[in-house]
Image (cartoon, rainbow, N blue to C red):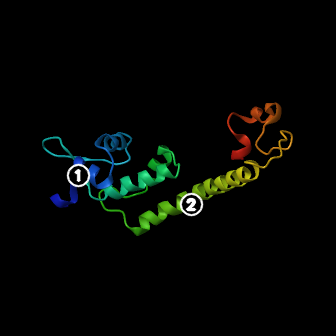
Amino acid sequence: MSKNDFLPIGELARRTGLSVSSIRFYEEKRLLSAMRTSGNQRRFLRSDIRRLSFIMIAQKLGLPLSDIEDQLAKLPQGRTPNARDWKTISASIRDQLDARIAMLERTRDRLDGCIGCGCLSLSKCQLYNRDDKIGEGGSGPRLVLD
């Protein structure tokens, strides 16, 4: 590897739009790792731009950091991930994304039917939890998320 294969943390921050502290946080969480210079400065592989981009996208999709860490562990260390590497990750999170999309569509459809429906009937409402019966199954908006 040549010197040009590495970026200082400030350049990585500029290229990804992340703050230096965010990059340090992801490094602390072992989502990426830095090499150290003789002066103990961090140097990141250029491929870490893609790793950080994946982290940002996965978080926007609602994946928890633990799942992101599991996915990034599948990528090679020390070489730029190729299309096959990313395809493997894509295939492994597809089911999670499909389930999230289905939940969002159910929620949207129920809200379309409820907002402004005018039924004024708490006994028929798809979102109302009469006498908190559903609370026995756990906290939160169970009718919408199921």
Contact? badges 1 and 2 (CB < 8 Å): no
Circle number at residue 94: 2
Q: CA distance from mark 1 to mark 2?
A: 32 Å
Please indicate whether residue 117 sits to the left or right of residue 104 in the image: right
Q: Amino acid at mark 1?
A: Glu
Give the label, 1 or 2, closer to the camera. 1
- Residue beneath the point at 27% across and 47% down: 34
The amino acid type, in three-letter code, at marker 2 is Arg
**Residue 4 location (% of width, % of height):** 18, 60
Residue count near mark 2 (Cα–Cα under 10 Å), binned few <14, some 14–19, many ≥20? few
Residue 69 image offset from top left, x and y in percent: 44, 48
Going by the image, does 61 lie left or right of 121? left
Q: Earlier in the sequence, mark 1 or mark 2?
A: 1
Q: Residues within 10 Å of mark 1 (few under 14, many from 20)?
A: some
Relative to 26, is 99 above or below?
Answer: below
- When the figure is inspected, residue 88 is found, relative to residue 100, above or below; the finding is below
- Left or right: where does residue 115 sit relative to residue 37? right
Query: Of helix, strand and loop, which one carries label 1?
Result: helix
Numbered tag placed on residue 98 in the rendering: none
Expressed as whole percent of the image width and height from the top left, the position of residue 9 reads 24, 47
Q: Is residue 10 visible?
A: yes
Find disc 1 in the rendering and name its residue: 11
Image quadrant holding the N terminus, namely: bottom left
Q: Is residue 72 visible?
A: no
Q: Residue at x 74, y 43 (%)?
A: 143
Number of marks present in the image shown: 2
